[in-house]
Amino acid sequence: SLKGKTAIITGSNSGIGLGVARELARAGADVVLNSFTDRDEDHALAAEIGAEFGVTARYIKADMSKAAECRALVEQAGSCDILVNNAGIQHVAPIDEFPTEKWDAIIAINMSSAFHTTAVALPMMRKAGWGRVVNIASAHGLTASPFKSAYVAAKHGVVGLTKVTALETAEEPITCNAICPGYVLTPLVEAQIPDTMEKYNMGREEVIKKVMLERQPSREFATVEQLGGTTVFLCSEAATQITGTTISVDGGWTAL
Ligand code: NAD
């Protein structure tokens, strides 16, 4: 059980982050939800998780595109036994048309935020004598696709950061790993469907099966519950010697 551990999950008012927060709470961890908004429903979401699983659940607003806010999130949480770097955005365009501000935002949110949160969390983990850093990378942290330059670069960067974090903590009771999901049907993926339909001149179902799941041999989306379960495993006793590596949850994508 993760009872008494505090988990911070960045970008967790939706999609994979929310699924991971729920599974960590189910395993007994107190959770800190995060996004850049500060709506009543964000705080209500935390209250629901707290009530459902009998844990302490808080929502802390912080914009992961800003270094100071990434660091303030972990400081404000007060303790951090489990850090899940999950916040991420996507933009799809050829390199020569890729807007500079989108490049900068993706590098900041998808990659640099993990550096800033980890920098503040590691001393807390050392003090507590235990820690787990789980970076939500992507199949695109290991392979590439056209039109996703910033995303692929950021996710490869996250895999690199994962290895360095693992080496710097190798002799301590702290591990750091990356989970590399294939396609998961979340709002992020949902938002790519219209553009992809236009790009390939296809209907929705055709885009899902022939374009999105074309590289996922299982032809099934992974689920947020499965990613939450993988995170809980990385926090378990069995995973103590797993560090500095990637776990693909991609229906065989990276085996192709
Ligand atoms: P999502 O859009 O449902 O969730 C993204 C989360 O990040 C949301 O909670 C959003 O509020 C938050 N976020 C966005 N910008 C932020 C900012 N500036 N500050 C703080 N929070 C911010 O998307 P998702 O699919 O759940 O993606 C979560 C992570 O999983 C991302 O890192 C994504 O790259 C990765 N991933 C997703 C898939 C997939 O198929 N969905 C596959 C591989 C990897």
Image: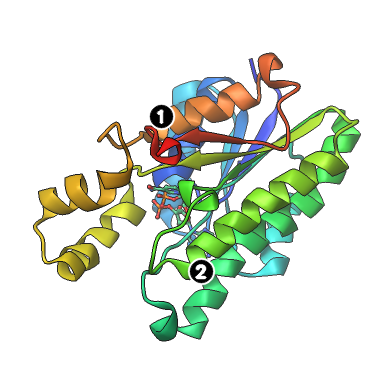
Of residues 153 and 81, the one nearer the viewer is 153
- From what the image shows, is residue 69 above or below residue 77? below
Q: Could you tell me the amino acid type at mark 2?
A: Ala
What's the distance in space between the residues labelled 2 and 1, CA to CA? Answer: 27 Å
Residue at the image point whose x is 43% and y is 81% from the top: 98
> Quadrant of the rendered structure where residue 16 is?
top left
Q: Is residue 77 visible?
A: no
Q: Quadrant of the N terminus?
A: top right
- From what the image shows, is residue 168 above or below residue 225? below
**Residue 101, image x and y in percent?**
51, 82
> Quadrant of the rendered structure where residue 244 is?
top right
**Residue 153, image x and y in percent?**
56, 64
**Along the horizontal axis of the image, is 171 left or right of 90?**
right
Label whose residue precedes the other's in the sequence (2 or 1): 2
Image mark for residue 198: none
For numbered disc 2, what is the local secondary structure? Answer: helix
Q: Could you tell me the amino acid type at mark 1?
A: Glu
- From what the image shows, is residue 63 above or below residue 50? below
Image mark for residue 150: 2
Q: Residue furthest front?
A: 256
Residue at the image point whose x is 91% and y is 31% from the top: 171
Residue at the image point whose x is 68% and y is 60% from the top: 70
- From what the image shows, is residue 211 above or below residue 130? below
Residue linked to disc 1: 225
Q: Is residue 152 visible?
A: yes
Of residues 14 and 55, the one nearer the viewer is 14
**Residue 75, image x and y in percent?**
76, 52
For numbered disc 1, what is the local secondary structure? Answer: helix
